[in-house]
Image (cartoon, coloured by chain):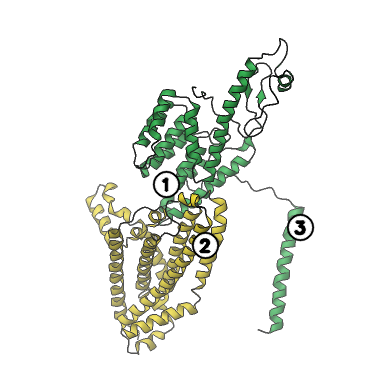
Amino acid sequence: MRRSTTTGLSVVIVASFAMSVGLQAGRDRRYPRAERDTEQIMYVRSGGAMKRLTLDFDALAADIYWIRAIQHYGGDRRTDTKRRKYELLFPLLDHTTTLDPFFKIAYRFGAIFLSERYPGGAGRPDQAIALLQKGMAAQPTKWEYPHDIAFVYYWHLRDFKTAAEWFQRAAALPNAPNWLQPLAAGILTAGNDRAAARVLWNQILQSDEEWLRRNAERSLQQIDAMDLIDKLQARINQAPVPPGSEYSWIALVRRGVLPGIPLDPVGTPFEIDPATGVISVSERSSLHPMPDRMHAPKQ
Amino acid sequence: MRAISCIAWSVFRESVRDRVPYNLVLFAVLLIASSFLIGQLTAGQDVKIIKDLGLAATAVFGLFIAIFIGIGLVSKEVERKSIYALLSKPISRPQLILGKYLGLVLTLAVNVAVMVAALYVVLAYMTFTESAQFRAGWDAPGIDPALLKSILLIFVELMLITALALFFSTFSTPLLSAALTFGFYIVGHFNNDLRNFEKVVDSPTVAWIARAFYHVLPDLSAFDVKTEVVHGLPVPAGYLVMTVAYGLLYITILLSASTLIFSRRDFK
């Protein structure tokens, strides 16, 4: 081919490409198209069928479902509260663990975020437990799965007897940490106790996974907020407002009951009910929604 | 022996001329690009996913090479009529089949070796850039020699598929050979289901036939230990030895059958 022909064709290619980009941009400006519906769907409903379809590449398919689960959770969490659904979180994690039954972190992710109260998570502790039991069936000697089931019963379902039973099951498995047995006994005697919750979250805080550590930090801050609320509430109860007045931080500060407007552990002012004086974490705080109230440890 | 090595070397050189090594560049780009991207998407599972991706890509790229070159090994010579020139030389037909086969196996070996080296380089990079605390959470070390167990079985599986493609190419057209090899590849991965067929059918005859098919068709799912090595689970040495031996025996059967068919073909 002659050199001039080559140059001419190269010019035609570059010019045509530049024109097509310009044409696309112009058309999109002039005739804006509606955003494509970003609703996520499960293309294959059965994890077992997917395992067959992927032949030997089931581990790689599990990775793809894992990435989809993360994206689904992250995407729904970032959207405005009303649109959050997390409805595919369980099927995605279920597929992930069917394709790769040894995908430990997928079970753990499910335990934390399927059970976490809506809108921070799916609010489905039942699904979290089902996923963890699947993990136990795949690896019956891993103490982490019964531990996580116990954790779901303890933190989300507030069923302390069942939680203690699962902690004991976890403690009986090989390589289980030695703090599990006393923890189970402690929960059986103290039940709804913040001290045991602190122990558990501090253990999760040692995790190698950053997202688990972040979740543990937030939960520990929620427990700190409960402690702070108890102290503040005690002070306010000792200084009731005069009849006909309402509770407010400004009034309490002016009366010298408090040195300033109290902040929660993430720096957002607490809310106070004007009629009753009951203190709570603000809906604007990243600690909202708080877990159910837990008892302060006995002194 | 010299004739076989000459044929094998010429097959290898031809595959290089056919730009087969280009897939290695694609593999390296895929791995390096994904190692940077995946970290952003996988919530700390990047090393596991790189291992999965590297092993799966090695198997897929090898499969394509095995099938698309394997089906042309004999049929191309027949189509181009170069078979006459070849057979007029002091080369026997079994030597030709074995030489062709070993040439493609050499091509696959070089490809797999380069892919494995690229995978270990990426894994080494990820290992040295992560903190010790983060590495402690991995199921298996980043630079894990146990990966070689899976790679060994992938390579034997690719050798078996090459033998299958060569077998079909001795009596069929390239298109049909490719379809048949792909078909056997898929059936080979479902083969394990035939073993316990009596659990789903009542008829002992049907169950017996299914069991016979299980033994006749290649049992390819046995070559997959990717999940186990990635999670640091044990793969017994006995299992490796028996699976490799099974693969080599099956290859022997296929090469013998290919030689038998090819020896009976009349090229007048």
Residue A213 is left or right of residue A9, and the answer is left
Query: Residue B31: which numbered mark, if any?
Result: 2
Viewer-side label of 1, 3:
1
* Closest to the observer, A50 or A215: A215
Residue that label 1 marks: A98
- A93 vs B215, nearest the viewer: A93
Q: Residue B94, percent across and down?
A: 30, 80
- Tell me the CA gap for discs 1 and 3: 47 Å
Toward the viewer: A52 or A135? A135
Q: Are marks 3 and 2 in contact (CB under 8 Å)?
A: no
Q: Residue A218: x, y in percent?
A: 57, 36
Name the residue: 41% across, 70% down. Answer: B66
Q: Residue at x 56, y 41 (%)?
A: A214
The chain that hosts pointer 3 is A
Q: What is the tally of numbered marks visible in this picture?
A: 3
Q: Residues within 10 Å of mark 1 (few under 14, many from 20)?
A: many
Q: Colour of chain B?
A: yellow
Q: Are marks 1 and 2 in contact (CB under 8 Å)?
A: no
Amino acid at pointer 1: Thr
Residue closest to the eye, A264 or A105:
A264
In this rendering, position of residue A263 left or right of residue A218: right
Residue A19: image tag: none
Note whether residue B135 is visible: yes
Q: Are marks 3 and 2 on the same chain?
A: no
Query: Can residue B216 be seen by looking at this rendering?
Result: no
Residue under numbered circle 3: A26
Instruction: Give the Cα distance between marks 1 and 2.
Output: 25 Å
Which SS class for mark 3?
helix
